[in-house]
Amino acid sequence: MATKLTSNGQVTAPNPISGPDCPAWAQLSAAAPVALARTTRELFAGDPERFAHCSVQAVGLLFDYSRQRVTPKLLEVFAQLADQLRLRERIAAMFRGDAINVTEDRSVLHTALRRTGQSAGSGAPLIVGGQDIDALVRAERERMLAFAEAVRSGVVYSSSDQPFSLVINIGIGGSDLGPAMAVEALRQYAGAGPRVAFVSNVDGCQLADLLVGADPARTLFIICSKTFTTLETRTNALAARAWLQSKLGEAAVPAHFAAVSVNAKAMDEFGVHPDYRFAIWDWVGGRYSIWSSIGVSLAIAIGRANFVSFLDGAAAMDRHFQDAPWLQNLPVLAAMLGVWNVNFLELPTLAVLPYDHRLSRFSAYLQQLEMESNGKSVRLDGSPVPMATCPVIWGEPGNNAQHSFFQLLHQGSARAALDFLLPVRSSCDSQPQQDLAIANCLAQAEAFAFGQSAEVVAADLRRQGLAPARMAELLPHKVHQGNRPSTLIMFPRLDPATLGKLIALYEHKVLVQSVVWGINAFDQWGVELGKKLCDTIVPLVQQPATASGISSSLRGALDFVARERR
Ligand code: F6P
């Protein structure tokens, strides 16, 4: 732990670099065995008002953590941890544009992208490095929304003066997952605009499948790539261009391609028309970029008013995150519960389980958001993190999951923490069916928490009139231990504002956890090595015989490629 001297030689308070440097961490360590020894059933029995004590309603969401293996007293220790880590200062530093992404020397300002209406109107303008960020964002957002509205309403025409009926977003990672997830989530708000589809994978199959039956004269491609150098996106963009050119001729190409990037030169080279290109900035991380022009396909899908409402939802969560006390603060609670589960209860994964099929891509979205952000094991000062960091995030729509992997979660040896996401209203006007989804979700949350004891199983088997020997055989197979911790996040309906809130909730959770673990949540050096190696392997795959000085495994794979190609 670093201790600082001021200029007059006085010792200032030590500057903790991660959770274990704080006094509260030792208290949490001491509390863990006690918590593990208490069942969830005992926690509820010991506090008849547990739901009231362990749930928060804020920003239109119900955040119920009563089925987690915590007590209100333990949460107070986490609040102390937040203070000891000077979390308030760290949050403020991000919002005011300090270069908190230290390895890339960049500000982290995705929150500036959603300072619209209510949130931008109040307070001082955001000036960073002498630039009026609000003005920059507002101008580019206006251009993007005007373009999106025009495409949506058929005012922007194709090369043959027809409105577009198909919009294909070409991008990967943060330039794909956010818009793809949100377009699906908000399908109910799509109205009569063009169909919006997504292509990310380099193998070309998604694009090929989409182009079967597509009308080139009515197809618009949007190339989304912050860098415009990403192999997958460049490959798909060139393939799309070749297809379009082969169908309509070279002169038609510019009217069918828009792009979003920081790389103006690359957009020039590709031939993107100046009116059809939109800027983002270095201070928008790819996985935090849905709020920027990277969200243009979403804006086309749901229209201007809904897109602004999506931004406003996130801005409401931003204000809550900045202002709410720790124990009422949803992102902070989500983060601290996650730390408790990973570092103290040693649960290495988090399953995210939406009970709304429209959120079927939400866990894939969170995989990048959380794992690319906090999948690190080195602290800001370069020292190793002395504990586990980001858990593996995974998940599926809850009802489907019930009929596949829930068996393992209920009775298997691998343990996971769970987040249930549950809208009250149907996302497709099928309320009686959504009521069944609600019942399923609540039933699962209860089953994971309380399980089914041997006594209950025995009574049940006895009622069925089973012979004692058969009962003894079956009983151990039917016991559910329970004590699987979960958080239930409920909301009135999955509308644009709510989706904005949910994403921002998880974004800020990531920031808080990065502060606890002492890591930089905003770089992603771990994805670079594979990209670099791929550049050297591409020519070897194309001409396998030329390879030398490579591992025997690589040699074996290339030989197999060569043999199969003959
Ligand atoms: O795979 C890593 C990554 O750099 C992500 O962080 C990013 O979202 C994605 O690639 C796509 O990058 P780009 O938008 O520059 O094409």
Image (tube, rainbow, N blue to C red):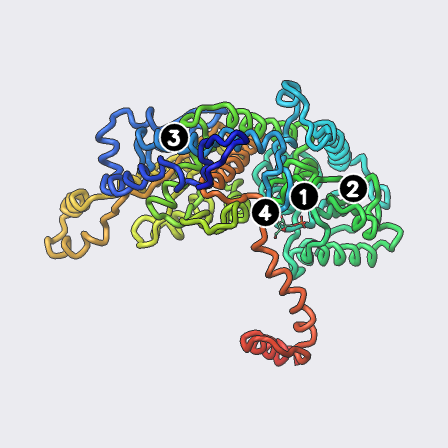
The CA distance from mark 4 to mark 1 is 30 Å
Dot 1 amino acid type: Val
The CA distance from mark 2 to mark 1 is 18 Å
Helix, strand or loop at label 1? It is strand
Check if mark 3's residue and mark 2's residue have beta carbons within 8 Å. no
- Residue under label 2: 277
The CA distance from mark 1 to mark 3 is 47 Å
- Residue under label 3: 80
Q: Is residue 329 left or right of residue 140?
A: left
Q: Residue at x 65, y 46 (%)?
A: 175
Dot 3 amino acid type: Gln
The circle on residue 523 is: 4
In this orientation, which residue lies closer to the viewer: 426 or 542? 542
The CA distance from mark 2 to mark 4 is 26 Å
The circle on residue 196 is: 1
Q: Residue at x 23, y 43 (%)?
A: 452
| Ligand 1 has an atom within 8 Å of the beta carbon of the residue at disc 2 | no
Q: Nearer the viewer, mark 1 or mark 3?
A: 3
Quadrant of the rendering where the N terminus is positioned: top left
Dot 2 amino acid type: Arg
Residue 281 spot, x, y in % from top left: 70, 40
Check if mark 4's residue and mark 1's residue have beta carbons within 8 Å. no
Residue 250 spot, x, y in % from top left: 87, 54
**Circle nearer the N terminus (3, 2):** 3
**Circle nearer the N terminus (2, 1):** 1
**Circle nearer the N terminus (4, 1):** 1
